[in-house]
Amino acid sequence: MFERRPPVHSVLLGRSRLAAGERQIEVASTIAVPANTPHTVLELQDPFACVAYLDARHYRFEDARRLAETWRHFVPGRDDLREAMGDVLRLPERRVDARVLRALAALETGTSSVSEAAAQVGLSESRLTHLTTEALGAPPRAWRAWLRLQRALHETLFNGANLTQAAHCAGFADSAHFTRTCKRLTGVRPAQMMPQTVYVAPDL
């Protein structure tokens, strides 16, 4: 059982049981979960269950729901995930306020605070928070943590960094901070995010 709250949309593939507040959901094959929605995975009934994260800067929740329906007959462990990812890349990109995207790009470097990123695009921190949450479903602080997490995982997966090195490279205080953030956003520790086979979708 693990709790999570990623600032991006997610599609869970595989039989499972979820909880969202007081409600429990039995998932027969796939389910789409909106960005920044707290939920708990109570049980994974499929040993090959997996999660696809859709960046809300590019995809709407409607796209995630359509993808979940497309993947309804996809069988983790049997079907080729790379072929399934092709369905994501064919979805239409969405339009987001350019100031929000520039601010998030500044946060992605790991060196800017939210207030500094807002100032760089001519907005107050409160206005940036409003625009980002309205457009993408999660505030800039949640995005900053997610972008740092992505960078740290990339350093570990592709550059051979250990958890401490990856944490520092991504702007975390230490590996414990990296681990806490990973568990809060994805529900699992960084080591559990390290698959034996890695597939990264081409840049959009």
Image: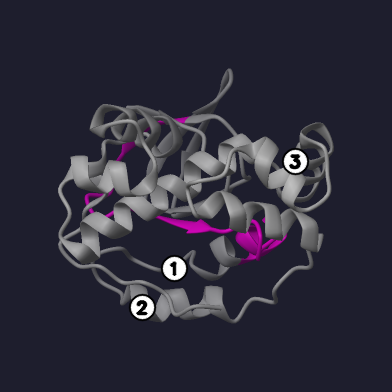
Is 189 left or right of 62, judged from the image as shown? left
The amino acid beneath tag 1 is His
Please identify the quarter of the rendering in which residue 119 is found.
top right
Residue 114 visible within the image: yes
Identify which residue is drawn at 63% across, 58% down.
Answer: 65
The disc at residue 73 is 1
Residue under circle 2? 82
Q: Work out which quarter of the rendered image holds the C terminus and state it.
A: bottom right
Q: Nearer the viewer, mark 3 or mark 1?
A: 3
Q: Magenta span covers which residues?
A: 40-66
Residue 48 is situated, as x and y percent measured from the top left of the image, at 25, 55
Residue 27 is situated, as x and y percent measured from the top left of the image, at 47, 44
Nearer-the-camera pick, 12 or 125: 125
**Helix, strand or loop at mark 2:** helix
Mark closest to the chain's N terminus, 3 or 2: 2
Please tell me how crowded label 1 is: few (under 14), some (14-19), or many (20+) other residues with Cα within 10 Å.
few
Question: Mark 2 to mark 1: distance in Å?
Answer: 15 Å
Q: Nearer the viewer, mark 2 or mark 1?
A: 2
Residue under circle 3? 133
Mark closest to the chain's N terminus, 2 or 1: 1
The amino acid beneath tag 2 is Arg
Nearer-the-camera pick, 27 or 145: 145
Mark closest to the chain's N terminus, 3 or 1: 1
Question: Mark 3 to mark 2: distance in Å?
Answer: 31 Å
Nearer-the-camera pick, 161 or 25: 161
Residue 95 is situated, as x and y percent measured from the top left of the image, at 79, 67
Question: Mark 3 to mark 1: distance in Å?
Answer: 33 Å
